[in-house]
Amino acid sequence: MDLLQLVDNMSEEMYLRLKCAAETGKWPEGTVVDQAQKESALQIIMAYQSRRLNSDEMMSIAPNGEMVVKTKRQLKERFTDDKNIARFSDL
C-alpha cells in the first residue's frame, strides 16, 4: 500500500495518534517513539492534512501540498477580537 492509499483509508483516530507521536515523541499511552517512527508519522500526518483536512491554519499542509504560511497582519486580524472578555488596563 502506498502513502496516499494509506491516508485515504486512515481513520481520524489514527491520525490523532500519529500527530501526538510526532509532536511529543511518545505514543498516547506513553511509549517512546524512535526516530524512524517519528519521521514516518510526520510524513503521514502531512499527507493526511493535505488530502483530508483542507485546513487554512498556520503550519498545516494545504490541499495543494504546500505549507500554509500567513503574514503577521493576517495572524493579528485572526486573533484580534473586539469583544474581549476582560480588560485589565486600569490596574
Image (cartoon, rainbow, N blue to C red):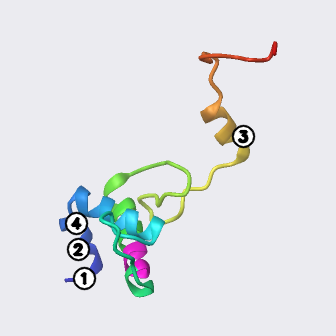
Q: Amino acid at mark 4?
A: Asp
Q: Which mark is residue 73?
A: 3
SS class, disc 2: helix
Q: Position of residue 85 (x, y in %)?
A: 59, 17
Q: Is residue 83 left or right of residue 18?
A: right
Q: Which residue is mark 2?
A: 6
The location of residue 29, given as percent across then percent down, is: 30, 65
Q: Which residue is mark 4?
A: 8
- Name the residue located 18 percent from the left edge and 67 percent from the top edge: 9
Task: Specify the principal SS of the magenta part.
Answer: helix
Residue 43: % across, % down: 41, 75
Q: Looking at the picture, which amino acid does disc 3 mark?
A: Arg
Residue at the limit of the structure toward the bottom, as seen here: 36
Using the numbered discs, state the Cα–Cα distance from disc 1 to disc 2 in whole angstroms. 6 Å
Position of residue 67 relative to residue 91, above or below, is: below
Instruction: Find out whether residue 41 is within the magenta segment.
Output: yes
Q: Is residue 30 magenta?
A: no
The answer for how far apart the CA atoms under marks 4 and 3 are is: 35 Å
Under mark 1, the amino acid is Asp
**Which residue is depicted at the point 51% across and 48% down?**
57
Earlier sequence position, callout 4 versus callout 3:
4
Q: Which residue type carries mark 2?
A: Leu
Residue interval drawn in magenta: 38-43
